[in-house]
Amino acid sequence: MKKKLSYAAITVTVAALALTACSSPTDADTSKGSASSGFGDCKVTGKPGSIKLRTQKPDTLTVSTVLPNPGWWNGMSPESVKSGFEYCLAADIAHRAGLKSVRLKNLAWDQYISGTATGYDIGMASTTITDERKKVFDFSRQYFSSNLGVATKKDSKITADDIRDAKIGVLQGNIGAQWVADVLKPTRAAATFQSQADMFTALNAGQVDAVVTDTTLALTSVKASAGALTVRGQFALNQGYGIVMPLHSKNTTAVDKAVGQMASDGTLKALAAEFLEPTFGVNPNSVPVWSLK
């Protein structure tokens, strides 16, 4: 059965991309890009000063993330990122706050998702909003709707009927890992990986039969496999990605307001069309939505 996914006023429902943990945090001011915008190659929208933020550095929005993450952050290091859905979303928030630049802090995934990192204003790394994560972060409203994709080798015969019997790979800290353990409940313990790259390397090598991760993450890794892998299906979660902030941040209300503005004025839809759809390689609507048997 296929379920049509569509853009909505506040969310963008499509799916997948590669989140790879880095060994140590780095940061860089990435404001020196397009002279027309002052925020890399982003075409910022909205009214400067429409929100007010308290930032770590004057005139600068400091953003934590996890690189590489193509489509969302186009570049391998903080210094090289000049575009991408989440980068330009951060740039637009900075612009609407009357700030002049964006500064990136590149973290390892486990450091980012633990909530222990400091010295940043907002964080974005395709982060699914969950009740557990709300205990360590403040979240904005969702800016992107996410599902869980099932990636396999091209010639795999795995279906929704027998996926519980497959050897499954999951990413530590990813919502897919929790979902596999608590909802799917496979007959064999899932293999847990520290990075998206390691997980898909294991899939290519036949060490696991399938990978369960964000559909957006899966589609990007599959596109890079030169036809060796495919996304066979996806499970609908009715959850989405949100901007994270330190717990009890004084910026939460303003950032949430900015995301709402960008949902209403078409900015989120435009960012998805420009940066995400080309990255997926296929129309996400073509990925069947599976139901557990």
Image (tube, rainbow, N blue to C red):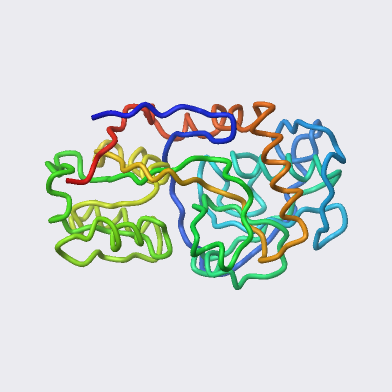
Specify the quadrant that holds the N terminus.
top left
| In the rendered image, the vertical position of residue 109 relative to residue 90, given as above or below | below
- Write the residue at 47% across / 30% down: 277
Q: Residue 273 placed where, x, y %?
A: 54, 27
| In the rendered image, the vertical position of residue 191 relative to residue 161, given as above or below | below
Q: Total label count?
A: 0
- Write the residue at 72% across / 40% down: 40
- Write the residue at 28% across / 63% down: 181
**Extreme residue toward the bottom, this view:** 116
Q: Residue 206 placed where, x, y %?
A: 18, 55
Query: Which of these two is toward me, 265 or 103?
Result: 265
- Does 217 sit left or right of 206 as displayed? right
- Does 7 sit left or right of 263 as displayed? left
Q: Residue 246 placed where, x, y %?
A: 67, 65
Query: Which of these two is toward me, 28 or 176?
Result: 176
- Does 1 sit left or right of 35 as displayed? left
- Does 21 sit left or right of 152 as displayed? right
- Write the residue at 22% across / 60% down: 185
| In the rendered image, the vertical position of residue 67 relative to residue 152, given as above or below | below
**Which image quadrant is residue 285 in?**
top left
| In the rendered image, the vertical position of residue 109 relative to residue 95, given as above or below | below
**Which image quadrant is residue 15 in?**
top left
Q: Residue 85 placed where, x, y %?
A: 59, 39
